[in-house]
Amino acid sequence: MRRPALVLVGIPGTGKSEVGRLIAEALDVPFVEVDDLVETALDTPATEYFATTGEEAYRRAEEQVAVAALDLDGVVALSSGAVTSAPVRAALNGLRVVWLRTTVAAATRRLSMNSLGMAGLVAIRNSMDAMLAERARWYAMVSTEVVDTDRLTAEQVAATVMGQQGAQ
């Protein structure tokens, strides 16, 4: 059975995609972006599907795609909500899972949300704070390592993750 060399988890804006690509390139393995696989499976942008069909239908699709992705070779960047699924958490058992932990303030800066104006930024940060409060326990539960990314570039995060791999 094929298994990922590494799985990255965290809220949006932690750098899972960029860091995952850097590490996959360094390891000369495929990079698997679950968000992209979900959109391909749904044949529509995730935001549109979510808005049209609702969160429950979206999460079911996300779960199926994430579980299947955890049987692939390479570096896998899970979608931020995938860890809320018990089958996904079970599939992560025994894998090297790194939680790229960041604050909501740093995540919104990385996602260029600071340009939305004060009211928009406050609303988004409040929503992301609630998301992080809900998901942090799941990220902590599934992760074998944690890297705090707030003050690091993607290259520095990738180097840290790669360095931790060598230390194991």
Image (cartoon, rainbow, N blue to C red):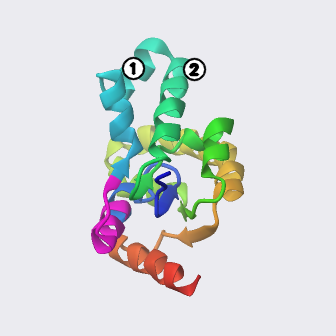
At label 1, the amino acid type is Tyr
Residue located at (37% from left, 65% from top)? 19
Classify mark 2: helix, strand or loop: helix
Q: Main secondary structure of the magenta part?
A: helix
Q: Please determine whether, in this image, residue 168 is positioned above or below residue 75.
A: below
Closer to the camera in the image, 17 or 52: 17
Q: Position of residue 93 (x, y in %)?
A: 66, 54
Closer to the camera in the image, 82 or 106: 82
Closer to the camera in the image, 12 or 8: 8
Asked whether residue 124 is drawn in magenta, I would say: no
Q: CA distance from mark 2 to mark 1?
A: 11 Å
Q: Please determine whether, in this image, residue 159 is positioned above or below residue 154.
A: below
Q: Would residue 47 be seen by someone viewing this image from the given angle?
A: yes
Q: The magenta stretch spans which residues?
A: 20-31
Query: Label 2: few (<14), some or many (≥20) within 10 Å?
Result: few
The answer to whether marks 2 and 1 mark residues whose Cβ atoms lie closer than 8 Å is no
User: Hey, which quadrant is residue 116 in on the image?
Assistant: top left
The quadrant of the picture occupied by the C terminus is bottom right
At label 2, the amino acid type is Glu
The circle on residue 49 is 1
Q: Which residue is mark 2?
A: 56
Residue located at (40% from left, 55% from top)? 73
Q: Outermost residue toward the front?
A: 1
Q: Would residue 85 be seen by someone viewing this image from the given angle?
A: no
Q: Position of residue 97 (x, y in %)?
A: 57, 61
